[in-house]
Image: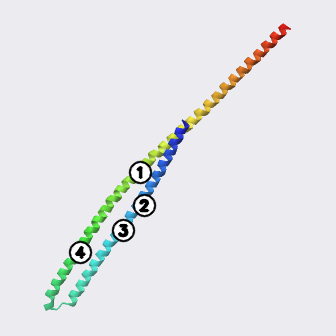
Amino acid sequence: MEHKHAEKVIIMNKLMVEVAENIDSRQRSMLEMDKKYKESLNMIMKLMGEGDTLHGDVMKLKVMNSSPSHDMEQISKELKENKAIINLQQKKFTEVFIVLQHEMEITSLHIAAVKQQNDYESVLLKLTDDLKEKNETLNAKIIDLETEIQRIRKRELEKEQNEQLNANIIQLLEHDKVN
């Protein structure tokens, strides 16, 4: 019975170690996803800065090339360039947004998994405490039973010794009667 209890305690300890390792692994994954999120955010900020720079460059060129005959061609060219830049930025923003959205979904799933893992760990800890309490109760009962067995054996031994003593006394008395 103690062996089965010890096996259960060993299994519970192994489960607790596995839960802790699982939580550590998930926390590392969450940190990695947070890093990717920050990198993506930095990339968006950089692209926005580049867009602002390009817009400023276009404005400078516009001022520098303000001759009336050249204005229409330059404006048309700038519009095409700006449209191409805006389309490219919009495409990059869309891609980054999709990546960030997926990362947020994954992060939410990991957070839910870690919460559930913590709930499991709490249950395992309660079960472990219950098993320890039952083990202590069983050990106390075993000690009580061993004490009772020792008391019974002592009485039996005293009884046997008394019976042997009585038999010896009867033998001596019979021997004395004969003599």
Q: CA distance from mark 4 to mark 2?
A: 34 Å
Q: CA distance from mark 2 to mark 1?
A: 15 Å
Residue 133 visible in the shown view: no
Quadrant assignment, res 163:
top right
Q: CA distance from mark 3 to mark 1?
A: 26 Å
Residues at marks 4 and 3 touching, judged by CB atoms closer than 8 Å? no
Indicate the position of residue 28 as horizontal and vertical percent values.
42, 61
Q: Which of 53/104 is in front?
A: 104
Label at residue 88:
4
**Kind of residue at disc 1:** Gln
User: Farthest right residue?
Assistant: 179
Q: Give the residue pinned by disc 2.
A: 28
> Nearer the N terminus, badge 3 or badge 2?
2
Q: How many marks?
A: 4
Q: Residue at x 25, y 84 (%)?
A: 57
**Kind of residue at disc 3:** Lys
The label nearer to you, 3 versus 2, is: 2
Indicate left or right for 7 with 178 as reference: left
User: Helix, strand, or loop for circle 4?
Assistant: helix
